[in-house]
Structure formats: C-alpha cells, structure tokens
Amino acid sequence: MAYLALYRVWRPQRFDEVVGQEQTVTALRNGVRENRLAHAYLFSGPRGTGKTSIAKIVAKAVNCEQPQEGEPCNSCSCCQDINNGNFMDVIEIDAASNRGIDEIRDLREKVRVLPAQGKKKVYIIDEVHMLTMEAFNALLKTIEEPPESVMFILATTEPQKIPATIRSRCQGYNFRRLTMEEMKGRLKQVADANQMVVEPAALDIIARRANGGLRDALSTLEQVYSYRGEQISKEDVLDVLGLVDDVFLSRLIDGVWSGDSGQVLQMLATALQQGREAQQIARETTWYLRDLLLYHTTGQDTGFAVVTEASIAALQQHKKAGTARILQALRILADTADKLRFSEGQRFILEMAFLEITALFTREEPPATVSKKQPSPVKTAPVGRREPKEARDTMWNKILAGVKERKIPTHALLCQGRLLGMKDDTVYIGYRRGYKFHKERMEEKPNRDILAEVLQEITGRPLEIQFIFLDDDQYNDIVVQKAKELFGEDIVEIKD
C-alpha cells in the first residue's frame, strides 16, 4: 500500500472525529439527520481547519446507505468509494486550476445529469475565490436553483473575494482556527498511535507554529519525525523549523535593553549561520515582546506564547523598558517580519530592525509632564539643522530596502542618487549630471509613487519629493541653493 501523509491518514471520516468547529459540525449533522440540508454551502476559514474534510463527510452522509443519527456509516459501498476517491457523484474541483468560464459552462451541462451511483451529486469547489468574475456569473443561476439531486459546497480561505450574489445564495459557515489545547491534544493522539515520544515543549512549538491549522501541525510533526525518528525533543523542532528558543530570545533582548549592538549583531549572525530563518527570528522575538508586554501589564499568571520557566526570570528585568517602548518595538518587528516574507536582503533588514529597537530601548525617555518653570532636558534641533551622516545613511538604506521590496527596477534607478536630507515635508534626493536618465525616470509618476509610499511607511506621514542635480555648474540652481541652505554645502557637494 502506498505511503500516506499523516494529515491524510488522520483526516476525520465522521463528524464526531472532527477537532474543533463544534457549531458547524452540530448544525450539519442535525441537517443530515432531519433531512434539512441546503442546496449550497460556503465554508470559509484559514487553511487546514477542516473545510474540505467536513465537505467530504457531508457528501458521504447524504449518499450513505445506512446513516446513523446524521453520521455516515463508513462501511457501505458508497462511503467506501468516497473514502477511496472512486465515487462518481462526488466531484472535487480546484478553482485555482479551473477558474475560467469554459470550465463552469461544462459544469452547468453536467449538473443536469442524474446521479450515477448515489442519491445526490455533490460538487466540492475548493479555493472558489479564484474563479473569474465571468465564471462566477456563469455559476450564479445554477447555484441558485440546482436540480434536487445536486448539492454545492464551496470552500475558500478568502471569503471577502466571493461576490455578494454568490454568498447570498449559500448557507455560510465560518471555520475558526483551532486552539492550542485542541491542537496539542490531536498531536499527542497521533504521536502515541505512531509510537512517537514527543516532549511537551516540542508539541507546544509545533502547535504555535501551525497558527491554528491542524494540517500544518501534522505536516510539521511528520517532518520532524522523518528527521529525528521516534524520540522528538524541543531542539529537534527548532532545528527543523529554523526557530530560536526563548532562552536565546531573552539573551537577545538583554543585548537590546543594554544597548550592546555588537552582542545583538553577533547573536543574529550566529543564529543565521546555524540555519535559523530571518523571518522566524523576527516573528519569535515579536512573540517574546508580546509575552513581556502582558507580563508587564497583568503579571506572571499571563498565558505565555514563547516564554517558559527557563526565561521567565529575565522578564522582570526587561519590563523596566516601559510599555511605550515595548509597544513600539513590537510594531517595528511585526512590520519587519512581514517585509521579510518577500525580501531578498533578509539579513540586512533584520539587522536594521534590531539596531532600531536597540536605539529605542537605550534612548532616554522624556518625562510625562514638564513644569513651566523647569526647562525641558531635551533640546529641540533648530529648523534646517543638518542631520548626522550616520542617521542620514541609515534612513537612505531603509528607503532603498523598502523600494527594492516593491520594485527592483525602481530601486536600480534610485540607488544612483543620494539622500541629501529632509526639511519640513520635503525630501531632497540628488543625482550627478551623468545620471540624468535615472533622475528623469524617478520623476515619472509610477516610480515617484513607489518612493512616496515607502517614505510614508517609514516616517508615518506623506512627504513631497524633490530631485535635483549636483554638478558644480548647477550650484546656482535655486533648488540646489535651497538644499545647501538646509543641509549644508558639504552634504550637497559630490566628491568622486
């Protein structure tokens, strides 16, 4: 017999085997028992939460020769054929591959044919949001008034993309993410059945990493099992998934909190060299900061996501950073984790984010209130003051990285310029005369819009952009003169 993946072996065959989704399961089972099923259903929710599995159980239940209180018997010929994928009247359609109007027209023609084996023909259309608008329109009338012998079950991870005209003709069920306890319970059951000995901490990591999707959790368990065998530890899961543990995270935040940039960069370099993923480091640190924030707010009884007994002592020291800083660091790292999904220069972006929060944690926090008689200890920079070269270079690198994520050709045009500085709501970027082509292309609306979007994301406000030439014979240009006044002649002057 061919080998089957764990998630296929453990796919529920009856309603009472489904993990979670109690309300959906109860409603559908009652509908089968009382013969009150709708002609069309829309199952929506995250991946791996049971949409297709429950659709197949419904298909079995309505065709079962000996149903038992709304449950399929799984022993009659119809149930067995459906389990084996040999039942002619259960038609599974992948809308991602069959999304055009021709495929839906073909479906409309076949709907009229009576069932060949069972009582009902059940069409299960997975990822239905991938259908074109023309295909949805072609399906509309059929799904509204199908023959009595036909049932439609539409499944999607993105219900907002389904036209309202389709949604209104279906009975909808929202599938929720499974809880940690539900996930760990099923993982423990699967592990015991397969003679695996899995540490509780390893199950915690697998369940958290799956983010409420049982299929992903079972796939991860199988992957670790293939790597390590029957004895599975927390470290095995970390190695396979490219994650870091809470002890590493607490030491990393130690370096951030103390302002030790060298330690932070060295720890990041070591983790990356060991095969850890940049995105996962950012994401796990975000979870650690979330635990820190809740510990700071509500105390030790908080349900931690990543923190264990091994690192809980460090939270007392780290919480001195204050709620405002922790929240800001959370935002920075959450944004970084999202950017790293599609970025090429992952190490650079990760290091920039950690250097940014290191500076944030070590910066002296201004007092909440300042007396009118007492001067503020923080001096405000005069208008037009030049920014330090390091800060300007850091900002320019962030701008280039953000533009590169969105469009590489735009990045190629922009990187030939240099950031001169920012005054009020205008950013000044200079080009040497030999890069006239690059400057003119950056002034075009599509490229300018990309740059403006990145600048707004970094600064939090919309900014104007001014491109200028920096050749010596252009210094009399009024814009260059203005730039020199704002940022200083040493910034504007180009020395090859």
Image: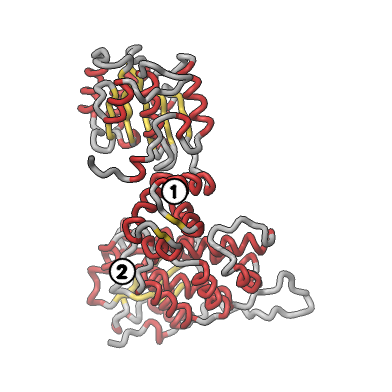
Q: Examine the rendered structure and indicate whether residue 278 appears above or below residue 54.
A: below
Q: Examine the rendered structure and indicate whether residue 231 appears above or below residue 123.
A: below
**Residue visible at 39% across and 53% down in the picture:** 221
Q: Which residue is mark 2?
A: 414
Q: Are marks 2 and 1 in contact (CB under 8 Å)?
A: no
Amino acid type, residue under disc 1 in the picture: Asp
**Residue visible at 43% across and 76% down in the picture:** 394
Residue 321 or 91: which is nearer the viewer? 91
Amino acid type, residue under disc 2 in the picture: Leu
Q: Residues within 10 Å of mark 2 (few under 14, many from 20)?
A: many
Residue 445 drawn at (x, y percent): 32, 57
Q: Which residue is mark 1?
A: 192
Residue 308 drawn at (x, y percent): 57, 64
Which residue is situated farthest in the right direction here? Answer: 373
* Left or right for 85, reference 40: left
Residue 448 visible to an observer of this rendering: no
